[in-house]
Amino acid sequence: MVVQLNETYFKSTSKTMKDIIIIGGGLAGIINAIQLSRAGFEVLLIEKGAYPAHKVCGEYVSNEVLPFLNLHDIFPVAFEPPHIDQFQLSDNQGKSVKMSLQQGGFGISRFLLDDFLYKKALASGTSFLLNTQVEDVCFEENAFRVSLRKGDELMARIVIGAYGKRSRLDKNLDRDFISKRTPFIGVKYHVKADFPRNLVALHNFEGGYCGIGAIENGLTNICYLGNKHSLRAHGSIEEMERQVLYKNPFLKEIFSQATFVFEKPEVINEVSFASKSVVHHHILMSGDTAGLISPLCGNGMAMAIRSAKMLSALICKHYKKGSFDRQMLEKEYTHAWRDEFAWRLWYGRNTQKLFGNKLASSFLVGLARNASFVANIMVKQSHGKPF
Ligand SMILES: Cc1cc2nc3c(=O)[nH]c(=O)nc-3n(C[C@H](O)[C@H](O)[C@H](O)COP(=O)(O)OP(=O)(O)OC[C@H]3O[C@@H](n4cnc5c(N)ncnc54)[C@H](O)[C@@H]3O)c2cc1C
């Protein structure tokens, strides 16, 4: 479907005015770019980094995205991502339970997936500015002025914020959540290890939890959400792992037997699960920029893809009508986003409180062992239906 843009509405005088600028080229940014470029919009995506690149992420993608990715020919089939249908949960001491995943998922590194989608976006007609950081965005006279760190300025009619969990830009845009500090840090490795190819595991440790899952080429992803106070107390990531994570025997075993592919781990800090604005200063937020679900749900990537599908479809719909009502688009997107994601984010945020705690994690494992139907309902609550 090619959407006819209503040029008379905007009456732009500037030659450099883009239809749409997308800030950030992770999953949400690139999926928006592919959908909107294919619909006939002139899309410029500005990404701070380049492709391919590693990202802190458990790299388990919920199967709810499969119909959408297949329909649009953007499922990375050539990389043969392992199919995952089993789940293991252990408490801080290593007492564990295994269960089948009703919907399941697949494992693929962001290194491959984001690069694959980037190439799809290029082929769809998206222009990219790589290694370029957006510093600020101003809305005036029904258009956006996007300031780059390098000093240049660009103009656009629509701006999508898809710049992830946290950015300097949030500070410049004066978003509420940015002033609240959080203790969470994320750490990721790729390893070669003897780990089942159809399993995703969540192992608790004091103050956090660690996901382990198969990805492409026989590799395994180890990714954990830890605590900066624990890191400070132990002085280094390595020492914290030995003193804290190794208390769970599953973690001790995988860390001891694995061959590490990276020289050092990928690390991020200040991981925030706070509520955020879905539209801010008329910028339409997508993916983690609108809200991050706790990683234990294994659903952030699927949500980024789903929110991009939702937003790009609404932009197309509002242009198709022949007149562009920005207020209407913002209102509809905010409602649609809240209907789809608000409960899941709340649920993830609160369930996460049971993880990383000795008693609570033990209770969770006991519950899953003795009342598997309750555990199945809990897993289901954090996931969406296939789309
Ligand atoms: C520890 C941890 C484990 C996780 N594990 C899983 C998992 O197993 N499964 C799952 O589904 N989800 C998981 N998630 C969540 C998942 O990683 C995110 O939900 C997903 O990456 C969101 O994609 P996104 O496109 O919104 O953001 P991102 O993928 O973060 O992309 C944002 C992009 O914006 C760019 N950017 C930032 N600032 C600027 C700027 N100012 N200008 C230009 N570009 C900018 C960045 O370089 C980046 O490329 C995990 C998260 C964490 C923290």
Image (cartoon, grey):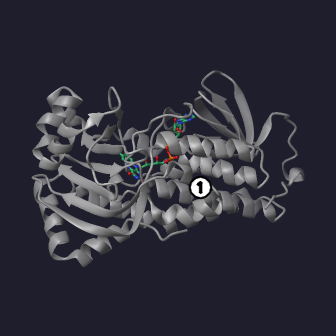
Task: Give how far across and how far down residue 148 sits, in percent.
Answer: 63, 28
Foreground pick, 71 / 5? 71
Quadrant of the image containing the N terminus: bottom right
Q: Is residue 156 visible?
A: yes
Image height of 324 relative to 271, above or below: below
Q: Nearer the viewer, residue 224 or 289?
A: 224
Q: In the rendered view, would you say 370 is above or below 169?
A: below
Q: Secondary structure at mark 1?
A: helix
Residue 184 coordinates in the image, percent (x, y): 29, 42
Some atom of ligand 1 lies within 8 Å of the CB belonging to the residue at label 1: yes
Residue 227 relative to residue 286: left or right = left
Residue at (79% x, 38% y) in the render? 17
Q: Is residue 239 left or right of residue 33?
A: left
Whole-percent x and y of residue 66?
A: 53, 63
Q: Look at label 1 and name its amino acid.
A: Ala
Q: Position of residue 386 (x, y in %)?
A: 51, 69
Q: Which residue is mark 1?
A: 308
User: Could you say which quadrant of the image residue 345 lies in?
Assistant: bottom left
* Closer-to-camera residue (293/108): 108
Q: Judge the density around disc 1: few (<14), some (14-19), many (≥20) Cα neighbours within 10 Å.
A: many
Quadrant location of the C terminus in the rendered image? bottom right
Q: Nearer the viewer, residue 321 or 217?
A: 217
Image height check: is 48 above or below 106? above
Q: Residue 166, located in which quarter of the rendered image?
A: top left
Residue at the image point whose x is 60% and y is 28% from the top? 132
Q: Residue at x 34, y 64 (%)?
A: 347
